[in-house]
Image (tube, rainbow, N blue to C red):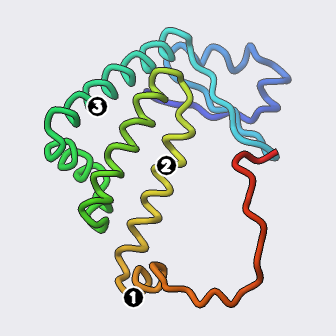
Amino acid sequence: MATKNFPYSAFLRGPSQVLPSLDDADVILERRDDENLVLMRAERFEAGAATLRIAARALAILARRNSDLAEEVLGEELPWTTWLPEDERHLCVRELLGHLVAGADTGELIPFSHALTAWRSTAIVWSDPNLARRLQGPFPGNGEEVDRPLSEPQ
């Protein structure tokens, strides 16, 4: 689907100048001091959400029935998974698929995005054997003692 960009202020001044663009594109409203906003027709949004749910569940079924094939499929899309040790690669696939299926079902995809970023960062660490070895410890333990963090930020 094509997108068209407009300044957010243009939308506020005259929505009738922006809304006709929704006939053949999604609209990105660019804001200077905050995240951009996306406008789209509900039918396109619902079609995308339904498609994502079906694809996520199909991939999850594939992973349960043939984890090696699922790992291969994700490895093609996420080539950095090759840097993960085998046991972590399996865990990565399971965790990402869990977040993907839950996100597709609820519409909340930010946990999937965060997990994807975290696993990619982990893979990058594993790509450097010296760094990976240093981060696995042992650690001298001669630093300042800190309180255990709360489970949820307040």
The residue shown at (73%, 59%) is 149
Q: Quadrant of residue 124?
A: bottom left
Quadrant of image for the N terminus: top left
Q: Which is more N-terminal, label 3 or label 1?
A: 3
- Residue 59 or residue 25, whichever sits in front: 59
What residue type is disc 1 on?
Answer: Asn
Q: Check disc 1 and report the residue beneath it.
A: 130
Residue 48 lies, with reference to residue 69, above or below; the image says above
What residue type is disc 3 on?
Answer: Ala
Q: Check disc 2 and report the residue beneath it.
A: 115
| Disc 2/disc 3 C-alpha distance (Å) | 16 Å
Horizontal and vertical percent position of residue 53: 38, 21
Q: Check disc 3 and report the residue beneath it.
A: 60
| Disc 2/disc 1 C-alpha distance (Å) | 24 Å
Q: Secondary structure at mark 3?
A: helix
Left or right side of 140 for 135: left
The residue shown at (71%, 38%) is 30
Horizontal and vertical percent position of residue 13: 85, 23
Residue closest to the far top: 43
